[in-house]
């Protein structure tokens, strides 16, 4: 995966914003949408791993980027709304679309 493409750079920037948001206490609206501290730490680690994988240009390990669906993972953990979920959905879409090219 070429990490120099505009779409990949945009996905990395959005991931950075998400990592920043997950690095501290979550805002009350996010907590109201089902976020717990355990979820915050889980997805903080997940986004760090995903970012490193994309920067390395590895499309299949540890995550298969063609099929990545972070918002579904969040929904499975009881997070069904909120800005962080929407950011995650955008990241998933950007990464999948780039990988499908």
Image: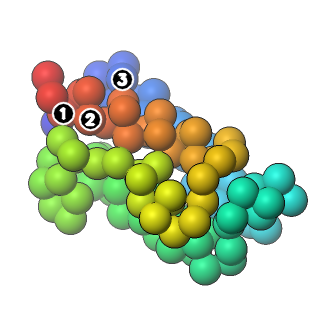
In this rendering, would 18 be left or right of 36? left
- How crowded pointer 2 is (Cα within 10 Å; few <14, some 14-19, many 20+) is rated as some
Q: Residue at x 65, y 48 (%)?
A: 81
Q: 33 or 43, which is in the foreground?
A: 33
In the displayed structure, would residue 85 be above or below residue 28?
above
Query: Which residue is the site of mark 3?
Result: 7
Res 22 → quadrant: bottom right
> Of marks 3 and 2, which one's residue comes earlier in the chain?
3
**Residue 48 shows up from this direction:** no
Q: Quadrant of residue 4?
A: top left
Picture quarter with the C terminus: top left
Residue furthest right in the image: 28
- As helix, strand or loop, the secondary structure at mark 2 comes to helix
Disc 1 designates what residue? 99
Identify the mark at residue 96; answer none if there is no mark.
Answer: 2
Q: Which structural element holds mark 1?
A: helix
Which residue is drawn at the image coordinates 72% and 57% (left, top)? Answer: 33
Q: Is residue 53 visible?
A: yes
Q: Residues within 10 Å of mark 3 (few under 14, many from 20)?
A: some
Separation of residues labelled 1 and 3 (CA atoms): 10 Å
Q: Position of residue 68 (x, y in %)?
A: 28, 48
Residue 16: give x, y in percent of width and height.
55, 46
Left or right of residue 51, residue 62 in this image:
left
Point out residue 70 in the picture as x, y percentages from the top left corner: 41, 52
In this view, which residue lies farthest toward the bottom? 38
Circles 2 and 1: CB atoms closer than 8 Å: yes
- Cα distance in 3D space between marks 2 and 1: 5 Å
Categorize mark 1 by other alpha carbons within 10 Å: few (<14), some (14-19), many (20+).
some
């Amino acid at each position: 995966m070429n990490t120099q493409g505009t779409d990949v750079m945009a996905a990395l920037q959005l991931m950075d914003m998400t990592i920043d948001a997950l690095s501290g206490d979550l805002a009350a609206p996010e907590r109201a949408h089902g976020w717990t501290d355990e979820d915050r730490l889980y997805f903080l680690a997940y986004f760090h791993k995903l970012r490193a994988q994309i920067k390395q240009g590895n499309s299949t390990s540890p995550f298969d980027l063609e099929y990545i669906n972070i918002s579904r993972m969040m929904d499975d953990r009881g997070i069904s709304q909120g800005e962080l979920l929407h950011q995650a959905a955008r990241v998933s879409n950007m990464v999948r679309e780039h990988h499908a090219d």
